[in-house]
Image (spheres, rainbow, N blue to C red):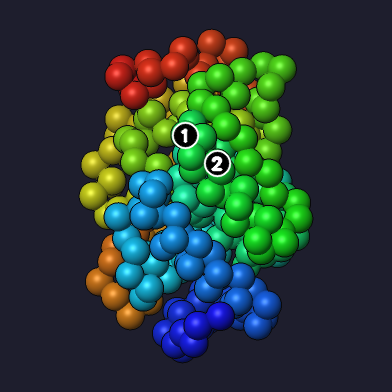
Amino acid sequence: MNQYDTRDFKKDLEAFGIVLSERQLEQFLRYYEMLAEWNDRVNLTAITEYQDVLKKHFVDSLSLTKVYDLRQNYSIVDVGTGAGFPGLALKIAFPGLKVTLLDSLNKRIQFLDAVIKELGLQGVETVHGRAEDLAKPGKRRESYDLCVSRAVANLSTLSEYCLPFVKKGGLFIAYKSEKAVSEIEQAEKAIFLLGGRIRERTEFTLPDSDIHRSLFVIEKKKETPEKYPRKAGLPSKEPL
């Protein structure tokens, strides 16, 4: 493996109370290398510079520890995982998690499968499909303690994709930029219809940066009505 300067990465993670073993550090570095290799032929991310990937993908993904205790062996689904953010990064840092990475594009799933195999990870699966289909009764509905998403969609749409996956009493946590604050009012109605309520919003900047982030923590108070999520495409075209 190439010699990488990991001092800033370690320092950033210590700000979130995370200390990686040498093995975990090697896994993150190999993940970065594979991301750069595959990105030449599969459009995974516009962010490819080493320090940028560490800060804007890995550290950002692990910022979840600000609002959620990941030391328990929870079951997590990452909806619209893309190149594995945040779900795969969370799995590397917290190996006890049971993680499902869900994406609608098969090329991304192939990349994730290759990384999982290369890193020797256990207790993580990939699923190719659309959230609207996989959250139906009889599939993966209300199967997870936590749903996470860094997908680019408004909070109303994301909630319709994500809350149906969460068990009653579980949480959906959305990663957003600071611009998302304006979405709250519109999203509250949708979240109520889907059986949830906004428990908190935590705003912060990533360590040693001016990169603003918000984590929206949404609690599943009751079962989501069976008519949600609506058929493919509707949640984004016509948010609740």
Q: Is residue 199 visible?
A: no
Q: Residues within 10 Å of mark 1 (few under 14, many from 20)?
A: some
Residue for badge 1:
105
Q: CA distance from mark 1 to mark 2?
A: 7 Å
Within the image, what quadrant is residue 189 found in? top left
Front residue of this view, candidates 137 and 20 = 20
Name above or below for residue 44 compared with residue 190.
below
Q: Which mark is on residue 227?
A: none
Name above or below for residue 162 compared with residue 31.
above
Name above or below for residue 171 compared with residue 138.
below
Residue 90 at x, y percent in the picture: 59, 59
Badge 1 marks a residue whose secondary structure is: loop
Front residue of this view, candidates 130 and 16 = 130
Q: Amino acid at mark 2?
A: Ile
Q: Amino acid at mark 1?
A: Leu
Front residue of this view, candidates 16 and 1 = 1
Q: Residue furthest front?
A: 41
CB within 8 Å, label 1 to label 2 = yes
Q: Is residue 202 left or right of residue 211?
A: right
Residue 61 at x, y percent in the picture: 48, 60
Q: Residue at x 60, y 76 (%)?
A: 26
Within the image, what quadrant is residue 59 found in? bottom left
Placement of the N terminus among the 4 image quadrants: bottom right
Q: Which mark is on residue 109?
A: 2
